[in-house]
Image (cartoon, coloured by chain):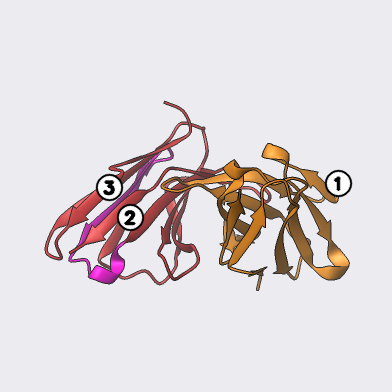
Chain colours: A orange, B red
Amino acid sequence: AQSVTQLGSHVSVSEGALVLLRCNYSSSVPPYLFWYVQYPNQGLQLLLKYTSAATLVKGINGFEAEFKKSETSFHLTKPSAHMSDAAEYFCAVSVIQGAQKLVFGQGTRLTINP
Amino acid sequence: ETGVTQTPRHLVMGMTNKKSLKCEQHLGHNAMYWYKQSAKKPLELMFVYNFKEQTENNSVPSRFSPECPNSSHLFLHLHTLQPEDSALYLCASSQDKGGETQYFGPGTRLLVL
């Protein structure tokens, strides 16, 4: 069965520092992988997704993620954090069982220190 | 309106009340989803509808009753809820194909007293 593990429920970085949010997946078939962001009192917004094209995926707001099959990882990075990046981030894997479903990780809350 | 909309945005109800949550998508998608997001648990998929047919019920208690009259509208009917049902309820839609993005509404914040 597909699953996702996000390492670290809270990550805190300084403004301008590198952001690294970790995601490992488990899948018996080539996966589709997603990163979503959730700002306070809002729904989830897609940051980027991997669908077996390029292994380095660029998303919105300067974020990118690299698919590494050997490590079963899909970590999210941003070279320089901005205060507006403070939010909760969710990694998800797509499961096809009848209809498409997303299996989400537990989420990582990102705090940006001035 | 564009995207996925949900009403109401906030709802307070007693345990004996009956209420309904509404979701509407303007994206031409054929699959719609209800998720529950509570403070101490990851996002939980509740129901999946594909072309108006329910294809997934993730062991959800019967006090939650979904309805999908067409591919653009999804309802969640609530009755005799418990305080532990207080959560953010999110609706999403997508094309029903592998790798397709699910688009989420802003959610309904539900408080059960």
Q: Is residue A49 magenta?
A: no
Mark 3 in CB contact with mark 1 (< 8 angstroms): no
For numbered disc 1, what is the local secondary structure?
loop
Query: Which image quadrant: the C terminus of chain B?
Result: bottom left
Q: Is any atom of residue A100 visible in this view? A: no
Q: Label 1 lies in what chain?
A: A
> What residue appears at the point 65 percent right and 43 percent down from the top-left corner?
A82
Q: Amino acid at mark 3?
A: His
Q: Circle 3 — which element?
A: strand
Q: Which residues are magenta?
A: B67-86
Crowding around mark 2 (Cα neighbors within 10 Å: few <14, some 14 to 19, many 20+) is many
List the residue tagged with mark 3: B10
- Farthest residue in the top direction? B1
Q: Quadrant of residue B36?
A: bottom left
For this view, does B64 lie left or right of residue B113? Answer: right
The count of marks equals: 3
Residue displayed at 17% across by 57% down? B13
Determine the residue positioned at 46% across, 31% down: B26
In depth, the one of A4 and A65 nearer the eye is A65
Residue under numbered circle 2: B66
- The chain carrying label 3 is B
Identify the element where label 2 is drawn. strand
Residue A70: numbered disc:
none
Few, some or many residues within 10 Å of mark 1 (<14, 14–19, 20+): few
Residue that label 1 marks: A54
